[in-house]
Image (cartoon, grey):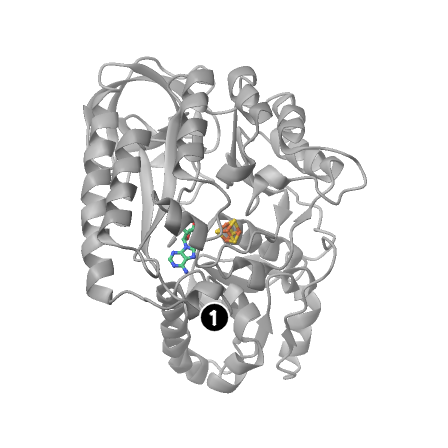
Amino acid sequence: MALPTKKVYIRTFGCQMNVADSEVMAQVLADDYVLTERAEEADLYLINTCAIRRKSEEKVRSLLGSLKVWKKRRPQLVLGVGGCVAQQEGERLLAAAPHLDLIFGTQGIYRLPELVRRAWMGARPVDVELAPCFPPLPRRQWLGAPLQALVTIMQGCNNFCTFCVVPYVRGREMSREPGVILTEASAFLAAGGKEITLLGQNVNSYGRGLPESVTFPQLLRRVAALPGLNRLRFATSHPRDLSPDLRLAFAELPPLCEHLHLPVQSGANRILQAMNRGYTREEYLEKVAWLRQACPGIALSTDLIVGFPGETDSDFAQTLDLMREAAFDQAFSFKYSPRPQTRAAGFPDQLPEEVKAERLTRLQSLQDELTIKAHRGLLGQVREVLVEGLSRRSPDQLCGRLRTNQVVNFPGPREWIGSLMLLQITEAHPHSLQGRPLEVPLTSQPLADRLPASPKELSC
Ligand code: 5AD
Ligand code: SF4
């Protein structure tokens, strides 16, 4: 078969789900397009968008605006917008951006080749249909020995947290069949992969609606048993659905990394209730305690929203208090942003921007203290690192992640990229650690030349 001569550039905004979707886009288009990292040489330019907060949406709109000039210079360029903003806005985007050739929603990625062909013919197609069942994902091929894989196990969400647009733009929860997931994961490991992250908006409710009765901890066990897997992670967990079985998985499955992302959102019961989160602060803290008991040394990260409608000073103080008690290693924190269709957007007592900004600053400085404290606790320890690439801080340093997810920089040659090795932690910084290699890795991997020079960009 002839190699494709046309080039596609994909700009990804948002979370890991979007990164995984962009990989699928590249794959479904692979018969006709090769992926390029240079936007200026693209024949097809796709923007995979995020609608979670207004700011993420604004970034997309501003990129789209700046591409008007490009399109004027190169009218043959096909410009498409996909993902959550496309799902939310549909036709409205076409009307607002006459230079746009194609709109595809969160499930349209599977129909991209046909949509792109129609766009080439000048049809300006819009595909924002949400299917009632999991669309058949193309069979992933793992060429070029990637080190880490994002494997989608489910999509959509039924939770309807009152602040969140996801159920509207990604549709109802749908799980992929375990057999399909295991085949994809095995192919990745056979190609030399080392780390798998299982992805879904709410992985703890994995399995509902599948013909075979299977829970998320059961799926984890099956994936963890695959030969050749060094590291297993998953995201995202809803605290309400965190089961004792999952706690056991942390204690029992060797590849499962000692890190859990468990978004709490707020530390005040009234706010948790108004958010429709389905747990109290006491229940959350109890789960944190039993996780730490089952898996001593587990690192916890979380998501927090400040300035939710009606949040008082005392509610906010309870959030700070919960952060101290849970001793989070890392937190992603956001000012509440009203989203279309969501219930909270219509709540009274929306807070002024200055209050949100002030609370965010206070919360982030507390988290900085907690993070540096956790980092200092690692000083002198010997830990395993997966060498992921060149350090952003300095070109003669490498960087990688501990099983507990902290970033470590350390001296070493490019040939070590792709290896697992032992390091001693020598310095603690607010956002990273510094390490000293304790060994030359046993298996040097021929990966160095195939990895992108800079790590994947994430804007979430
Ligand atoms: N405003 C601010 N933050 C939000 N998130 C989701 N929706 C909103 C919103 N409307 C945050 C939550 C979620 C993370 C992915 O984004 O903390 O866990
Ligand atoms: Fe959004 Fe809540 Fe679903 Fe997470 S669980 S995707 S916050 S609705």
Whether residue 418 appears in this view of the structure is no
Q: Quadrant of residue 334?
A: bottom left
Residue marked by disc 1: 340
* In the depicted structure, whether residue 430 falls above or below residue 276: above
Question: 10 Å neighbourhood of mark 1: few (<14), some, or many (≥20)?
Answer: some
Whether residue 83 appears in this view of the structure is yes
Q: Residue at x 35, y 17 (%)?
A: 383
Determine whether, in the image, residue 363 is placed left or right of residue 76. left
Q: Residue at x 45, y 18 (%)?
A: 295
Q: Please tell me in which quarter of the rendered image ligand 1 is found.
A: bottom left
Name the spot of residue 423 as percent of width and height, x first.
31, 18
Q: Secondary structure at mark 1?
A: loop
Q: Quadrant of residue 402?
A: top left
Q: Residue at x 40, y 23 (%)?
A: 289
Name the spot of residue 231 as percent of width and height, x first.
51, 26
Name the spot of residue 315 as percent of width and height, x first.
28, 48
Determine whether, in the image, residue 290 is placed left or right of residue 308. right
Q: How many marks?
A: 1
* In the depicted structure, whether residue 230 falls above or below residue 273: above
Q: Nearer the viewer, residue 192 or 317?
A: 317
Look at the numbered disc 1 and say if its residue's Cβ is closer than 8 Å to ligand 1.
no
Determine whether, in the image, residue 18 is placed left or right of residue 225. left
Q: Quadrant of the N terminus?
A: bottom right
Amino acid type at circle 1 is: Pro
Q: Nearer the viewer, residue 292 or 14?
A: 292
Name the spot of residue 152 as percent of width and height, x first.
61, 44
Q: Quadrant of residue 151?
A: top right
